[in-house]
Amino acid sequence: MKTRVANEWLVFAVLLAVLLLAAPNALSPFRLNLLGKFLALAILALGIDLIWGYTGILSLGHGVFFGLGGYCMAMYLKLAVGTAGTYMVALPDFMVWNGLKALPWFWKPMYHFWIAIPLAVLLPALCGAIFGFLTFRSRVQGVYFSIITQAMALVASLLLIGQQPYTGGTNGITDFNDILGFPIAAKKTQTGLYIVTVLCLAACYVLCRWIVRSKFGRVLAAIRDAENRVRFLAYDTVMFKVFVFSISAALAGLAGALFVPQVGIISPSNIGVVPSIEMAIWVAVGGRGTLSGAVLGAVLVNAAKSAFSESFPDFWLYFLGLLFIGVVLFFPEGCVGIFLRARERFRRPAKKSPGAELKSEMEKPVPQRAGGVSR
Amino acid sequence: MTPNTFLLGQTFNGLSYCSILLLISLGLAITFGLMGVINMAHGELMMLGSYTAYVLQNIFLRHYSEHFSYYFAIALPLAFVVAGAVGLLLERSLIRFLYGRPLETLLATWGVSLILQQLMRQIFGANNVDVRSPAWLTGRWEPFPGLELPHIRLFIIAFTAICVLLMYAVLFRTTLGLKIRAVTQNRDMSACLGISTGKVDAYTFAIGSGLAGMAGCIISLMGSVGPNTGQNYIVDAFMVVVLGGVGKLAGAIAGSFAIGEVNVLFESFSTATMGKVLVFTVVILFLQWKPSGVFPSKVRSLD
Amino acid sequence: MAESIIYLEGVTVSFEGFKALNNLNFIVDRGELRVVIGPNGAGKTTLLDVICGKVRPVEGRVIFGDMTDICSLREHEIARLGIGRKFQTPSIFKNLTVFENLDLAARDKSKGVLSTLFAAPSPVKREAIFSTLETIGLASKASQTAGSLSHGEKQWLEIGMVIMQDPKLMLIDEPVAGMTGKETERTGELLQSIAGERSLLVIEHDMVFVRQIAKKVTVLHEGSVLCEGSMETVQSDARVKEIYLGREAREHGGN
């Protein structure tokens, strides 16, 4: 067991080294930027895996938290343009052409990088905690919860679109110049952003690993398997779910904040119902309940999306649709899951003798009542 | 227009919006409420109904323009058949492997919805298309001065009422309906009694899908439709079913009324989007107050 | 200190009109091992549901120990007060190991979010878990996934989990359902060994088992107590015979 854990950290260290040292030198700035984008999304996927793979909560509205973080960063970047914008005033261009005269109050804190960034993480965490508390406390779970998160995503995107003077509307917020004084389009800045993303991903991975390996993580697994039973063991499951949901929202916010400067724009199309469901597929493809699967899935699916939109844009949606169906019907454990299962089989060829199989079959009880086994 | 007629007018508009919502949600109430199947492609089945109307309209315009006013009467049942057939195909090829796994069904049907949307986009183009109402549906009725009730909305309300009554009739007065209720309440026992659960599932799902198709057909009268039409309504429809209570058709009716009227009410005070936001807030708050009244109570099982 | 560990006063539980418990008055004394029997639908499981907070009564009070009315408390609060339950169908955590199942159940100063996040492994607790593993006979399967246990072993694991909770009152719902004769006997011995300072409330149908472990038996019928006493008293009571054996005698010609 100890060697297996040590092996995992070895792989982790190697990957980290590759990402930090080899990639910036081997990849073109365009590809590096893409990778940075994927790795930012991988942080988001970690958050989704925490709640879905480990706790059994499927959120189809995490785009909202991603967007909160992304918009915070975007607001900072937009304000950092200062008077260098098209209109030469210290007001974002879309506000000028929408007739706003002064900066709305909730934009004001975003002047400062060291306020915007913590907000990008804490604001989604707070919203996640509130939303989670309201829904989990009323025992909303399973599919009902997922549907409500969808509604939340829809409402958030509608709000953003509808309030164009304050939020940039459907166009979103774009046209950034600098970040912390560095020109955002410069190769050095982008490489720096990439490195920061890798380090953040590594840190988040370690954090998530710690969480799921702890007793807290086992409580989460128990909640996933049989939440009611956990209640009767004196655990307040609502608090556990709210906490992990809040953390996953914070991760989503961080991902958003890292995503925006690398992509140059954030708009309601990043946060609504459609992108939110896609996030779930990344985790499903990579492997639910395995943190590395979340990262892998995020990178793989988004890389595929990039590839498709370069060559066969019309077919991307078909591929994605088939991916949804395939992951559910044919490979529910995802890539990492399949890999782990194959590895188990290589390490431990069937130990059970036929006699043992029979004995355990006979020990199964005859069902005593016609209650049925439908779930 | 006096304040009374304004209010009446608003209520009437609300009523017709409720009817649309109800028609969409009725199919969902059957597949989700009765069968426990989350069909994210429900909106796309609606869209298929809309496109059926569109295609039929074009055929009539080109070949039978003198009889154009009849096309809609054919479009409605045709939409039911088309959407029902696609739904049947969906059920047999995909959904029946996923019973008892609602989250998986949600994801898989979402994939189907993506495929259907893209298919329509490739066939008909990404832009919305217009469906013209037949002559007998344009025009208004003025029961008393100041109150104008468009024929279309009257038709929608009447049609929805008929559909609801038909659904009740089928479910509670026919053998098929009895079988449907039996299978959804206790699958194993029904199978033991010789009911072909596979067939019943297929029929139930087809009926729910067909209703969606007809809803789409009606929606095409209200405005232009396109590949994204389904997406515009699906979340609302799910809200209706969640709010109204799963397992009872009456729940869908109650839910549609609640959400429909609240929506229109809020819209008259502010914008359409704010209306939706407020509806969502109301739903969340309502769930705080009455979560067990909305969701089926588990009596003896643990989970 | 009160004589009774649990006292139900005039408790009525209604499921959409059907009265599962009907103005029930029921007391278990401290340190007792009480068995509740009754035909299907008598309200036995509902009785346990009310005590552990799974179901709320429409009327009545449920007093635990020294005058704590637990009707309004939530399930985890009731569990923390010292009530542990083993459910009818073994509900263990199938993706966790046997050890982890017991570890989760183990009594702790605090079972909140932060304390589980920063929980340090405790050798004392480890000892306790292994000792329980010995008691329930699963010591060799500590690192096996709970889902791979046989049905009987799952039942024992759940009993082990209840033991680890170290509750003052244990609610045990049909502990020997689906077990072989030998396993049933072992379970009986196990339950008798853990009673004593603890109070046990057991529901069972298996009369051999009931006879093995019970000192006092309560018969429930249609949501109320029909009869209470030793096994002999209850078995010779005419009303009990009617609801149990009378029906069977009519239908199957004796038991």
Image (spheres, rainbow, N blue to C red):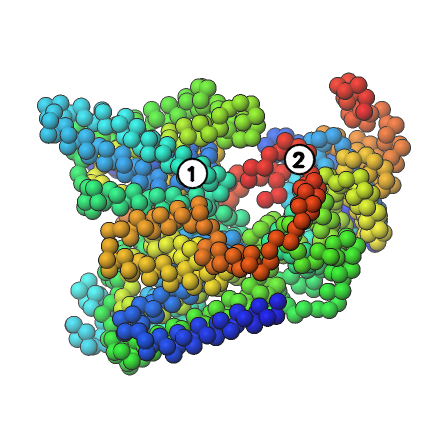
Query: Which residue is drawn at the image coordinates 51% and 53% (left, top)?
Result: A56
Question: Residue B108, image x and y in percent?
Answer: 40, 45
Question: Residue B174, image x and y in percent?
Answer: 44, 19
Disc 2 to disc 1: CB gap under 8 Å: no
Q: Give the secondary structure at mark 1.
A: helix
Query: Which residue is drawn at the image coordinates 17% and 75% (left, top)?
Result: A88
Residue linked to disc 2: A367
How many numbered circles are shown? 2
Q: Is residue B233 above or below residue A68?
A: above
Question: Residue A152, image x and y in percent?
Answer: 39, 52
Q: Is residue B283 visible?
A: no
The CA distance from mark 2 to mark 1 is 28 Å
Residue linked to disc 1: B95
Q: Are marks 2 and 1 on the same chain?
A: no
Which chain letter matches label 1? B
Q: Is residue B39 above or below residue B280?
A: above
- The front one of C3 and B123 is B123
Name the residue type under label 1. Ile
Query: Which residue is drawn at the image coordinates 61% and 53% (left, top)?
Result: A350
Question: Residue B223, image x and y in percent?
Answer: 21, 39
> On the rendered structure, is A371 left or right of B52?
right
Q: Is residue A317 visible?
A: yes
Which dot marks residue B50? none
Name the residue type under label 2. Pro
Q: Is residue A299 above or below residue C30?
A: below
Query: Which residue is drawn at the image coordinates 46% and 29% (left, top)?
Result: B198
Q: Give the secondary structure at mark 2.
A: loop
Point out the image quarter for the C terminus of chain A.
Answer: top right
Point out the image quarter for the N terminus of chain A.
Answer: bottom right
